[in-house]
Image (spheres, rainbow, N blue to C red):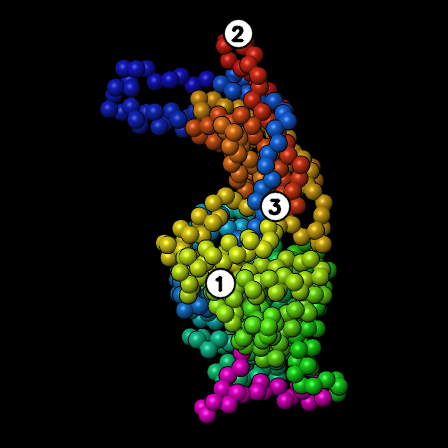
């Protein structure tokens, strides 16, 4: 045991510095004992033994935010061409804030418009990285691999956000590189106003996007793939106010006219077949990778009867109700970008309607619009979701809109006061992870805790729960972490549980304070294993 400072030394002007250094040494001392010498018996203020304390069930709520590259107030990079070191530091800062807000998932935009925020042989580098499409970052790094590692280190899932058919963004600053699809396969490209689009009616266009999806799934440790609301583009009008039709005459004549479907039904069928194929192929490649879509929040006007607004079924050719009803998605997150009290688009009314379209029991989350509502409205929306179900959650658009608004950040943090695990997805897999070994000791109000990786492999997360003065606290830690130091603590119970990548929770290993059993030096002995 490390000595206390003598009283005379405590009166020295160097006392505080020495005490701080002593605390660091004491921490290293405990860490070394717990991490490196699990078979050692050592003297401790408090020792622990297996016990019957029952930790409370963890909160279950999906708490996500989009990290966008193309919004006016983009999350990351904040502008194209920033130095690599600044890009990394900015992203780490965002992920730190997400962790502080007790979020548990990030939707990271990796393919804004047939380009790549990662190293790809299928599509060129996004101009958002270097300022020039097709140009790799220097010094080289892979932003997606970096984001995944940093997100997982902070207890955050990372879902790769892919725009399936947008081929160029109207606000692009650099010309398309020579290996971009507008040049390599111009026969698949349709120009609609100032937008450039892959034609969903072209089988080769669908195959290209599917290949991009599977490339990300196979090469990266993503937790999911997510599409937003863009399939066919939102309708635009000409100078005299007439809605322009999407210019897919070529594919309609090749494939649609012989389908026996109306043109609108054929377009919907193109999207439906694509969604189903993506769902199937992801599960073949990696069954545990989730697939989700965040569609426009209104399926059709008058569904339910009081709802008014754009007809996503008729205008975007997106039959999101069918995708959910058929179980093609693991989660659906309709964009409910209206207030709770909106008479024609009431947030809770629409959320309740979507939940009722779910015979397969998939997740239905609420995508919320943080950029245009005050903190009080977002609080009401989170509470409205919780009123309807205890196994749902929210996706905030977008992260910087929360972190950059102190009032909103405080409101979100108040609602997410304790960490939460994502709801499990039992239709994918429901096998609880193995229990693990747990060791702990407390010395001078510093508690060192260590646990072991199960023989079955590293879990995605650990759920560490600690009880002090009858109050349990919860932390979600990365699966690679196997120790924790708690300062100013003397827990009476400690629990560790493994959590897999689908949110399945293992049985707890629990230690409680050992009943007093004095030994020769007046301390209690703790055997770590």
- Asked whether residue 189 is in view, the answer is yes
Circle 1 — which element? loop
**What is the crowding at mark 3: few (fewer than 14 residues within 10 Å), some, or many (at least 20)?**
many
Secondary structure category for the residue under label 2: loop
Q: Nearer the viewer, mark 3 or mark 1?
A: 1
Look at mark 3 in the image and give the residue it sits on: 460
Sequence-wise, which precedes: disc 3 or disc 2? Answer: 3
Looking at the image, the residue that sits furthest to the top is 520
Question: In the figure, residue 458 lies in which quadrant?
Answer: top right
Q: Name the residue that disc number 2 marks.
A: 520
Residue pointed to by mark 1: 340
Q: Is residue 270 above or below residue 142?
A: below
C-alpha separation, residue under disc 3 versus residue under disc 1: 36 Å
Give the alpha-carbon distance from disc 3 to disc 2, as whole Å. 43 Å
Residue positioned 58% across, 80% down in the render: 315
Tell me where residue 410 appears, x and y as whole percent: 40, 50
- Say whether marks 3 and 1 touch (CB < 8 Å): no
Q: Which residues are magenta?
A: 234-257
- Was residue 242 drawn as part of the magenta stretch in this picture? yes
Q: Sequence-wise, which precedes: disc 3 or disc 1?
A: 1
Q: Is residue 141 magenta?
A: no
Residue 286, by quadrant, is bottom right
Q: Is residue 138 visible?
A: no
User: Which of the two marks, 2 or 1, is nearer to us in this view?
Assistant: 1
- Residue 138 horizontal/vertical position (percent): 44, 61
* Nearer to the camera, 378 or 420: 378
Name the chief secondary structure element in magenta: loop
């Amino acid at each position: 045991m490390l000595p206390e400072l003598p009283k005379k030394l405590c009166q020295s002007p160097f006392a505080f510095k020495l005490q701080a250094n002593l605390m660091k040494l004491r921490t290293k001392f405990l860490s070394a004992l717990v991490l490196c010498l699990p078979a050692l018996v050592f003297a401790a203020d408090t020792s622990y033994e297996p016990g019957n304390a029952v930790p409370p069930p963890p909160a279950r709520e999906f708490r996500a935010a989009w990290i966008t590259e193309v919004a006016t107030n983009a999350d990351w990079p904040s502008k194209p061409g920033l130095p690599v070191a600044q890009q990394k530091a900015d992203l780490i800062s965002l992920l730190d804030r997400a962790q502080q807000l007790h979020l548990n998932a990030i939707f990271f935009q990796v393919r804004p418009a047939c380009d790549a925020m990662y190293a790809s042989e299928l599509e060129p580098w996004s101009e958002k990285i270097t300022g020039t499409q097709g140009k790799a970052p220097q010094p080289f790094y892979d932003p997606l691999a970096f984001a995944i590692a940093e997100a997982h280190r902070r207890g955050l899932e990372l879902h790769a956000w892919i725009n399936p058919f947008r081929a160029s963004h109207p606000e692009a600053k650099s010309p398309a590189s020579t290996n971009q699809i507008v040049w390599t396969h111009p026969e698949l490209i349709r120009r609609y106003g100032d937008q450039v689009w892959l034609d969903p009616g072209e089988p080769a266009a669908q195959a290209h996007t599917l290949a991009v999806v599977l490339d990300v799934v196979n090469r990266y440790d993503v937790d999911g793939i997510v599409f937003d609301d863009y399939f066919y583009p939102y309708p635009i009008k000409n100078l005299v106010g007439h809605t322009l039709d999407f210019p897919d005459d070529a594919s309609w004549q090749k494939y649609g006219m012989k389908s026996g479907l109306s043109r609108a039904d054929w377009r919907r069928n193109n999207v439906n077949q694509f969604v189903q194929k993506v769902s199937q192929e992801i599960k073949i490649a990696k069954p545990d990778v989730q697939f989700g879509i965040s569609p426009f929040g209104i399926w059709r006007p008058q569904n339910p009867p009081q709802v008014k607004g754009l007809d996503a079924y008729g205008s975007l050719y997106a039959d999101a109700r069918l995708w959910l009803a058929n179980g093609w998605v693991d989660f659906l997150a309709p964009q409910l970008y209206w207030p709770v009290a909106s008479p024609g688009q009431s947030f809770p009314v629409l959320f309740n309607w979507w939940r009722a379209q779910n015979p397969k029991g998939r997740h239905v989350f609420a995508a919320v619009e943080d950029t245009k509502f005050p903190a009080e409205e977002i609080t009401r929306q989170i509470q409205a979701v919780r009123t309807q179900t205890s196994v749902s959650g929210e996706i905030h658009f977008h992260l910087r809109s929360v972190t950059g608004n102190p009032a909103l950040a405080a409101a979100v943090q108040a609602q997410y006061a304790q960490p939460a695990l994502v709801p499990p997805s039992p239709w994918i897999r429901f096998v609880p992870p193995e229990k693990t070994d747990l060791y702990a000791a407390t010395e001078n109000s510093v508690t060192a805790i260590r646990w072991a990786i199960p023989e079955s492999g590293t879990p995605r997360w650990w759920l560490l729960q600690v009880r002090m003065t009858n109050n349990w606290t919860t932390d979600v830690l990365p699966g690679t972490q196997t120790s924790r130091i708690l300062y100013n603590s003397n827990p009476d119970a400690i629990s560790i549980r493994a959590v897999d990548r689908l949110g399945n929770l293992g049985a707890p290993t629990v230690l409680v304070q050992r009943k007093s059993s004095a030994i020769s030096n007046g301390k209690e002995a703790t055997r770590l294993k």
